[in-house]
Amino acid sequence: MSEKTISVLEGNNFVVSDLRGDIDASPTETQGLFKWDTRFLSRWILTIDGLRPNVLSTDDLDYFYVQYFLVPGTGTIYVDADLSIIRKRAVGNGFHEDLTLLNHKDAPVDLKVRMEAGSDFADLFEVKDALKKKGEFYHRIEPDRLILGYCRENFVRETLIAASAKADIDERGLSFAVHIDPHGEWKTCLNVVVASPTIGEYREETTYGHGDQRSRSTVKKNLQKAGEAIPRLSCDWPSLQVTYQRSIVDLASLRFYALTLGGQAVPAAGLPWFMTIFGRDSMITSYQSLPFTSNAAIATLLVLAQRQGIRVDDFRDEEPGKIMHEARFGEMTAFEERPHSPYFGAADTTPLFLILLDEVERWTGNAGLVRQLEFEARAALRWIDEYGDRNGDGYVEYARRNQQTGLENQCWKDSWNSILFADGTNSRLPRATCEIQGYVYDAKVRSARLAREFWSDLALAERLEKEAAELKHRFNQDFWLADRQFFALAIDGDGRKVDSLTSNIGHLLWSGIVDQDKADAIVNHLMGPRLYSGWGVRTMAEGEGGYNPIGYHIGTVWPHDNSFIAMGLRRYGYRKEAARVAMDMLEAATYFKGRLPEAFAGYRRDQTEFPVEYPTACSPQAWASGAPLLLLRAILGLEPVGNHLIVDPAIPSRLGKIELLDIPGRWGHIDASGRGRIDTTAMESRPQPAQEKIVV
Amino acid sequence: MANITSTFFEHLAQRGYEPLLHNVSGTLRFDIAGEGSWYIVVKNGSLAVSRDGAGADCVLVCRRGDFDRMVVGKQNPTTLFLQGNMKITGDLGLALMFERVFPDESLAGSEQGKKEGN
């Protein structure tokens, strides 16, 4: 996101404007009022006597509420203004804007105030790919409002614009002839309602009316409630407090209210492109948040269960039992020009569903949920064996059924060029990436516990345990690159081991699929100079043929990736290394005011001194916001065991003392604390294993 | 096929229990232009179908042609809804779950070859 824009949102309704509050969308500026993946306003421009005001300051007081303080534009450099302009905007089913003009002169003024309005009704996919519309635009001028509309057959989207003050309305906006007495003021409310007559609740009013955004804010109340329920953190290092608060607020704002679940909130993936349900992102964020709140995880599991695949559908990459990738609601989805209704192109979501279900039970003791979702969990297990393993080789591999608009890579590194050989060439489909095998292993181990303890199916439990053990055994042989001492990124369609060194091997530690005698070599790579930038583990190691420090999945550092790697390091007993990953990432967060971006560049830390944000990253991004939470879990060593929470701190010394109070779970509430004893600055980059000396 | 719409509901009534709806309970009414209304009572996956009934938790309104195309697997229920060609009022979650009964495989005919061999 550009530094010069400001975003306010409620659910999947959001506004991206400039610092004046204006919306002036262009192919390069993703501004607009959006809901249901449709842009309802592409122009919303205020002028006073034909000139656009200058900005004094902008306050985003709340993520759904913002104030803009402006002075008239002079066309030249700033001179003392005798007029102030205040815009206050609250987002909800469109937005409500209070526009106030204050006359500071001893004399009356007469002004022409104009609000230019227009909409291209673009689908978010059209915004991204600059595509043309296929339907008809129309407008209606009613006595007290302007209606901008778009229809394609029965697909109708309308923007209803009304003002409380008397306005001259034309098809391109509203004009006001304003007279203000000496030291007087003039006000109008502007209501912009987004109307999707065919989706969900149809309301011809905004969520917030004049002046009531404070009192009626359900979002704010929910946030306050969430704020009360989440554990309190105290820490000697103040930056961690800032990051923690930022994460909690961002995660509260990045929510999608599922219409099909009575409005329960599930984590959306990120602003502005991904304010929707993503199987992977929603589950990863839920997992990261579990020590702090379990509501999002439960809602996520229920929504994904509702949308579990039940049939074979090539267009949507749907298969029975598969957990979806992404749901969209815009025009291109409606007319099947894109497959997101929903789209199932992800091979890791189904095992992640089982992992999350087990993890939720471990934290909350919610046996009812495990029983309620037994049918879906069994269907997910069947998908792994029947559809996930396409060629019967015992590994889950992916290749899209939808050749036109499907995703080529169906793992978290979903850009087309992420699964590369060490010489930089692309691998062939179908691809079995290593981390997915780890997830499958973990999913089977965990599901065996669920089968035994909750589904009374001992035979299933024993079968799953046997399969998991066999998978682990085979994987440690088939994916291991003996000469390089790490696991191949993938096995490709030609049966070749994709031999780039990547962060994916860290996920293998998290899953527990790595044989103990291989862990040292993996950790040496993760913490070695080729993968470790000084801020975190790169997605791909420096020196690989495809490496690019600003390549999306081939060299950048992703906070969520690192949070899982830190958990993996803890799982295998590498306490100091986990502490180092956590400390470096938390230090990186201080350069972003506590809000970690989706990804930052893979430059060496000593080269740039500060982490360089990846240019087109979404911000905030849910699983980046969730990363500090999982890192906190990693350094406090929080593990639910039965009805107890084990606390086993391994805290960087710079953080000093940490206390996390009232951690919710099946135990009620428990406090965890620890003192920083690990000097992560003293840790040298670990040497690469000397390859010729390793005896396999 | 005499009438795809009524055959679909006959099959649904004969099915009696649909495991994909094991977690679903509620009442739906389909208003199909030119064909009239059908009521479906779902109780933890068991199905009862009738031509008349009282209020429904969820009402779905669409054209006969669109409905029949859903039955034979040529129209996806979600996109029919998103296009504005199926109006749904009431419990959307219930409507979403009920989608799972489409298509009717025995009426799908041409759809049988759709599953891709791996």
Image (cartoon, coloured by chain):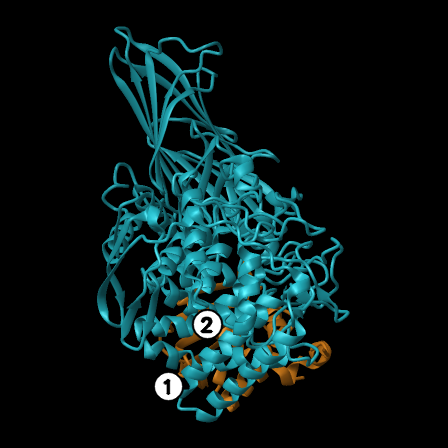
Chain colours: A cyan, B orange
- First-in-chain label (1 vs 2): 2
What label sits on residue A622 in the rendered view? none
The residue pinned by badge 2 equals A355
Task: Name, please, the residue furthest toward the top.
Answer: A107
Q: Position of residue A199 (x, y in %)?
A: 47, 57
Q: Where is residue A267, by image quadrant?
A: bottom left
Element class at badge 2: helix
The residue pinned by badge 1 equals A453
Q: Position of residue A92 (x, y in %)?
A: 37, 45
Residue A393 located left or right of residue A119: right
Q: Position of residue B6 (x, y in %)?
A: 56, 82
Element class at badge 1: helix
Q: Where is residue A174, by image quadrant?
A: top left
Q: What chain is tagged by disc 1?
A: A
Q: What chain is tagged by disc 2?
A: A
Q: Is residue A296 visible?
A: yes
Same chain shared by disc 1 and disc 2: yes
Q: Against A278, is A113 above or below? A: above
Q: Position of residue A287 (x, y in %)?
A: 41, 63
Q: Amino acid at mark 1?
A: Glu
